[in-house]
Image (tube, coloured by chain):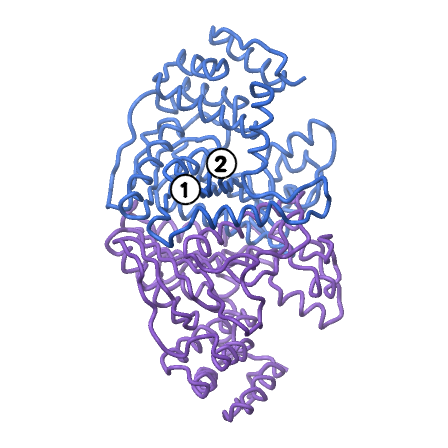
Chain colours: A blue, B purple
Amino acid sequence: MEVQAFIEHCMQVVGTRASHARSLAHVLLEGDLRGHYSHGLNRMDVYVTEIRAGICARDGEPVVEKESAATALVNGKNLLGPVVGNYCMSLAVKKAQDMGVGWVVAHGSNHFGIAAYYSMQALKENMIGMAYTNTSPLVVPTRAKEGTLGTNPISVAAPAMDGDSFVLDMATSAVALGKVEIHERNGVSIPEGWGCDSGGRVSTEPKAVLSGGGLVPLGGNETTGSHKGYGLSLMVEVFCGMLAGAQYSKHIRTWRVTDRMADLGQCFVAVNPEHFAPGFNDRMSHLLSLHRNLEPVDPGMPVMAAGDPERKHMQTCQELGGIPYYLSVVKHMNEFASTLGVRPLLPTHRHMQ
Amino acid sequence: MEVQAFIEHCMQVVGTRASHARSLAHVLLEGDLRGHYSHGLNRMDVYVTEIRAGICARDGEPVVEKESAATALVNGKNLLGPVVGNYCMSLAVKKAQDMGVGWVVAHGSNHFGIAAYYSMQALKENMIGMAYTNTSPLVVPTRAKEGTLGTNPISVAAPAMDGDSFVLDMATSAVALGKVEIHERNGVSIPEGWGCDSGGRVSTEPKAVLSGGGLVPLGGNETTGSHKGYGLSLMVEVFCGMLAGAQYSKHIRTWRVTDRMADLGQCFVAVNPEHFAPGFNDRMSHLLSLHRNLEPVDPGMPVMAAGDPERKHMQTCQELGGIPYYLSVVKHMNEFASTLGVRPLLPTHRHMQ
């Protein structure tokens, strides 16, 4: 596929090992394919810049520093996030094969794209997969003024029958930063419960959130449970920065800053249903269909299960014969690629206007 | 302590094995001590009624049905939730001692009180503990009209230095049902983002939520991320009903119905930081103090970490020399106890008016 080759090429001209460039291109493409454009091609320049600046390793292998039959602590050796993530998730699945559970934690990692890319790897072995990562501070804890936590995502995937699955992949903030940025670009206000200003007060003004303010945890404000979203974000830090001995919370470098390595902490878990009650996949299918078939409030808005919106986007891509991109993104990446001497992507009828 | 003995006595006169009655009394008391009165003495009558109706077992032992060095599937034998919970959590901790992680799942269980009671047991061994349970349907999935999910709590506890800890214990709904009931009793409306009416529409009318409507998932509505709370609730079902082969989702009997056993699914996890990066407790203490010392929006409302509100309530109890109860609760339980021929609790100056 042309976008895959384009990303690989851009990464390779700055010195990234070919197989690592391929891993990165694959997870970015998967982000786009699942409709999470904020974690796809759109971010390629950040990875290239980090490799070029020498703050992310071009080559090497993750190393296991400590291990039991069911756990491992991995040093990501400052390699690209997908290289570390693929290594750790495959290790977690291997451990769960024998032991029923595998719990693998990495320090020295970098941004790994969409978390579901890793949790879903367990589905191929008919296991539950989980992936967590800490990220740069953007989210303001309940009652505070200052952003000290990342959007710290939680992803849990579980297999049902016939290739069907449950795939949760959520930031522990109410929304992702990208949503606020889009509202700013369009000059419209944001709903209450997305962000706050620099004084920690609820704001519907995108600019206030983006400059000096921050995102708020899932739940919006304390009355409607933002302390729970804040607690979930800290839970992700417990699994990642705390267990891994990586950077954490406000010590993580700001997004797009290239003066030091990220040293992110990440956590990958596999649980093998074979070690528990028989009939797991049947029950999963029933749980999913029970919810998908609920009578909706609005007949045009069917009840979905986690992973269904992404499934729908993938179907659209299949019908179109490719991933529809915004021309502005393609144009931006082509301009970036030209500075590297990489041949541009050709806009096609599939790219969105 | 008199409340402990009172609950034990009420449970024993209906035939509960003494040690099981003691386990139940202890978790209910701990609920009250931590300020979660909805999960304390206030619920004693439900447990007594279930034992008396014969839908919860008076005596017996949980049984391991399947086991690896790191996992177990337990049959709770329809025993009281705390009996099953204590058994499973202790098994998870034992497994994590050797393997770094222990993942234990139970079917055939009953309501177990506050989830943090189990996750916190891991703290004594300087481990991370987790507890999850499915519960009776009350929560209406995003876009739906009908409640198919319980408040399905998540609890994660992690040890810091000098006995300090992070203790997350949250329903995956925006609020607990008890909060809506209190507003109804006081004749005041509830904030937007707590519940919906029988048509699945946001409602600020407690009566509409309590009769035919339901609670909404954490996030409130789809714009502010209720699909995430809904997804977390399904995640708890994956860990509990799905892995355990227990009842799940809308098949779980309604709260206070006594015509059949509950067969709840529950999940208990222990993770041993010794198997990961050194310095875990130091990092935890730093993460907690970093957040507690953030400048608050309102100087009278300090920034807290998960578990701090409960810690504050426990301090108050210590200062008072006991747990302050509402006289109405004491009166109600004394009336109930008199039907069992159990000597009443004596209201003291410590009971709240």
| Residue that appears at 31% across and 54% down | B71
Question: What element does badge 2 sit on?
Answer: loop
The answer to whether residue A39 is above or below residue A240 is above
- Measuring from the top left, give residue A331's x and y in whole percent: 60, 13
- Measuring from the top left, give residue B173's x and y in whole percent: 59, 56
Quarter that holds the N terminus of chain B: bottom left
The answer to whether residue A265 is above or below residue B309 is above
Pointer 1 or 2: first along the chain:
1
Question: What element does badge 1 sit on?
Answer: strand
Q: Which residue is mark 1?
A: A129
At label 2, the amino acid type is: Ser
Which sits in the foreground, A143 or A341?
A341
The answer to whether residue B62 is above or below residue A137 is below
Q: Are marks 1 and 2 in contact (CB under 8 Å)?
A: no
- Measuring from the top left, give residue A49's x and y in whole percent: 46, 19
Is A236 displayed left or right of A95 in the figure? right
- Measuring from the top left, give residue A347's x and y in whole percent: 60, 11
- What subunit carries mark 2? A
Tell me, yes or no, if residue B186 can be seen here: yes
Circle 2 residues within 10 Å: few <14, some 14–19, many ≥20: many
Q: Is the same chain shared between marks 1 and 2? A: yes
Report the Cα–Cα distance between label 1 and label 2.
Answer: 24 Å
Which sits in the foreground, A207 or B37?
B37
Which sits in the foreground, A215 or A44?
A44
Residue A62: give its label: none
| Residue that appears at 31% across and 61% down | B65
- What subunit carries mark 1? A
Q: Which residue is mark 2?
A: A136
> Nearer the viewer's eye, disc 1 or disc 2?
1
Name the image quarter holding residue B9.
bottom left
At label 1, the amino acid type is: Gly
